[in-house]
Amino acid sequence: MVWDAYSARFFRRKDLRKSQVTIQGLGPGSSVASVFVSRWDAAVADKDIGALKNRLGIAIARRSYKACRALLTSPRWQRIYNAGGRPQRLLWASTGTKDPQASDILYIKALAAPVTVNTMPEATLTALADYDEPSEIMPLDGGDCEEVLAQFARLGIHIDALAAQLQEDGEKSFVNSWNELMAVITSKSSILWKKL
């Protein structure tokens, strides 16, 4: 899990026989674990899911938040906090609503929670500014996320397989974006070198 990898950087084995662990290298660094919310709903948009439309991404986010909160209150993390470590935050990405029939702040309202970051698109931020009612804070226990996910499973949506596919697609997208960026930098650098 992403959080285990993040917290592991604070620990190193001192004595394998006694399993004594010391905390090291605590600095001001911060980290996020990203959840691309609307991509879950986009991945099942062509399925006949009835009243579950636009609920998968929120259920996945709420399950992630529940797991994150449980981890950050664990004895392991209490040791990290006591030594000056900072928690890894959940970052809600892809929070612009893709469904034109849904609220433009669907994900923003559902994902308001402490110790999270939301990278909402500008249009969503503008829509949020026009919204008068405060959002409810996401329940620490994930609310109805497990029941919603169970309903998707009963409809034949395999969450683990979908997660693997979304991760693979996301990785390819990031690699393509990186390669495009590097090509632009190379091109611009070449032009600048010719002017020198």
Image: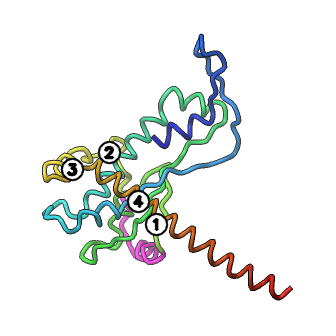
Q: Looking at the image, do the residues carrying marks 4 and 2 touch, with CB atoms under 8 Å apart?
A: no
Q: Element at badge 2?
A: loop
Q: Disc 1 or disc 4, which is closer to the eye?
A: 1
Asked if 14 appears above or below 142 in the picture, the reply is: above
Q: At which x and y percent is residue 19?
A: 58, 16
Q: Which badge, 1 or 4, is on the more N-terminal residue? A: 4
| Image-quadrant location for residue 11 | top right
Locate the C terminus and report the quarter of the image it occupies.
bottom right
Mark 4–mark 3 distance (CA, rounded to whole Å): 18 Å
Callout 4 environment at 10 Å: few (<14), some (14 to 19), or many (20+)? some
Query: Which of pointers 4 and 3 lies earlier in the amino acid sequence?
Result: 4
How far apart are labels 1 and 2 at the CA level?
Answer: 29 Å
Q: Nearer the viewer, mark 3 or mark 1?
A: 1
- Which of discs 4 and 3 lies nearer the camera? The answer is 4
Q: Which mark is residue 173?
A: 1
Quick check: is 127 in the magenta stretch? Answer: yes
Give the magenta part as a residue range.
Answer: 122-135
Residue holding disc 4: 36
- Kindly identify the residue that appears in the image at 32 percent across and 51 percent down: 60
Q: Secondary structure at mark 1?
A: helix
* Mark with earlier residue (2, 3): 2
Name the residue: 60% across, 16% down: 16
Residue 142: which disc? 2
What residue appears at the point 50 percent right and 36 percent down from the top-left corner?
4
User: Label 3 is placed on what type of residue?
Assistant: Val
Amino acid type, label 4: Phe
Which residue carries the number 3 mark? Answer: 148
Across and down, in percent, residue 170 comes to 43, 61
The secondary element bearing badge 3 is classed as helix
17 lies above or below 169 = above
Q: Amino acid at mark 1?
A: Ser
